[in-house]
Image (cartoon, rainbow, N blue to C red):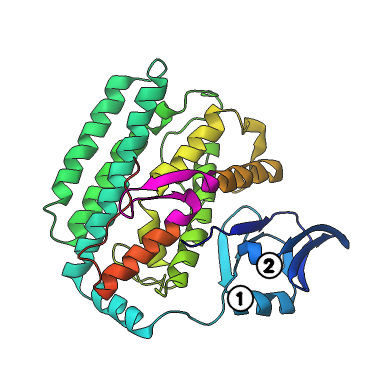
């Protein structure tokens, strides 16, 4: 089984990252603040004004360490990777399937089924863990509605139908999401999903963690030789990693959304960790962002049982396992893409 490697997140403005021997060094104000052996890293994510030496960029490209550049507040800007890996025949088959609306619809339906099943799990877990603090009847109605939509997915025949079902399920899910916040309710209020920009702290957290997910899923897809820009549910658009967005759908509820709820309900984040920009966007301050990154990394160390491969794996390897299953399906090794269902 593949070893789970760490991701280095550099958030301090003015930091400089460079290579020294077989290590990566982070400096701030010409003082060394961190030194890590290269073999422990699978990726580097730079926030805002963070510089990387040309030698580091070349070294990481050569050793398959992805580097992503984000704005200070977490919006994706660019990524740097080495030569494309994987069998060109695999990518050619990926493109052929993406051009076939019927085959794309079957994959998209499986992905959305995984997302909806995992969304129901988040709601049902809330009933189990916080039944005395939430409106159980309302959440059960939403969960039942999503279950009926899962049944509709089984007979959906085209991408427009599948996207419509996904949209209806998202409306049901986010309509009760505020109910799942059981602590700091006056300070963390969720009315609707908004982004570009996020207009409240809950949406700011969701958008930030979704960005981290995209980085990890994109890296996993490139590792197994797939093109992260050509998806089946998310169609081609310049600059959009369609397949990465496809694959992350089933992870959103159980990794990102649950982490946001945990951060708020356990008081690991506070309302003073967010500020409103002149544009109206709500942004996460540096201290809170570091807290989120630490908890995200910790969450990736948790062990889970994967029902398809029947093994216990660190949560952080889930992206690679699902990317590998997608590649196996595209090659024709398995009959269909099996989405991940959280148990």
Q: Earlier in the sequence, mark 1 or mark 2?
A: 2
Q: Secondary structure at mark 1?
A: loop
Whether residue 338 sits left or right of residue 237 in the image: it is: left
Name which residue lies at 56% across and 75% down: 81
Percent of width and height locating residue 139: 30, 27
Q: Residue at x 62, y 34 (%)?
A: 269
Which residue bears the numbered disc 2?
Answer: 38
The residue beneath circle 1 is 63
Residue 193 position by quadrant: top left
Query: In the figure, residue 12 lies in which quadrant?
Result: bottom right
Region of the chain picked out in magenta, as a range = 299-318
Q: Position of residue 229 (x, y in %)?
A: 41, 71
Q: Is residue 104 left or right of residue 60?
A: left
Image x and y of residue 74, in percent? 59, 54
Q: Are marks 1 and 2 in contact (CB under 8 Å)?
A: yes
Q: Residues within 10 Å of mark 1 (few under 14, many from 20)?
A: some
């Amino acid at each position: 089984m593949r070893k789970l490697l760490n991701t280095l997140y550099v958030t301090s403005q003015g930091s400089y990252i460079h290579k020294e021997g077989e290590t990566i060094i982070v400096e701030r104000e010409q003082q060394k603040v961190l030194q890590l052996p290269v073999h422990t890293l699978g990726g580097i994510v730079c926030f805002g004004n963070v510089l990387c030496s040309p030698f580091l960029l070349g070294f990481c490209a050569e050793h398959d360490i992805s580097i992503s550049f984000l704005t200070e507040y977490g919006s994706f800007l660019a990524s740097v990777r080495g030569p494309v890996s994987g069998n060109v025949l695999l990518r050619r088959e990926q493109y052929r399937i993406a051009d076939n609306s019927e085959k794309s619809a079957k994959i998209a339906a499986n992905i959305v089924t995984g997302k909806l099943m995992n969304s129901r799990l988040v709601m049902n877990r809330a009933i189990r863990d916080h039944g005395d603090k939430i409106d159980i009847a309302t959440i059960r109605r939403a969960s039942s509605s999503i279950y009926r939509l899962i049944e509709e997915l089984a007979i959906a025949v085209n991408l427009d139908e599948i996207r419509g079902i996904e949209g209806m399920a998202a409306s049901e899910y986010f309509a009760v999401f505020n109910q799942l916040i059981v602590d700091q309710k006056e300070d963390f209020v969720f009315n609707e999903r908004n982004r570009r920009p996020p207009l409240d702290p809950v949406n700011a957290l969701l958008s930030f963690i979704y960005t981290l997910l995209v980085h990890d899923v994109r890296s996993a897809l490139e590792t197994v030789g797939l093109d992260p820009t050509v998806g089946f549910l998310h169609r081609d658009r310049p600059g959009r990693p369609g397949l990465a967005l496809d694959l992350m759908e089933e992870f959103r509820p159980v990794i990102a959304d649950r982490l946001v709820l945990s951060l708020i309900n356990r008081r690991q984040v506070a309302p003073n960790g967010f500020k409103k920009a002149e544009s109206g966007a709500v942004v996460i301050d540096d201290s809170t962002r570091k807290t989120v990154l630490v908890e995200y990394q910790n969450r990736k160390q948790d062990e889970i049982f994967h029902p398809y491969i029947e093994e216990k794996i660190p949560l952080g390897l889930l992206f690679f396992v699902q990317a590998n299953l997608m590649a196996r399906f595209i090659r024709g090794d398995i009959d269909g893409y099996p989405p991940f269902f959280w148990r």
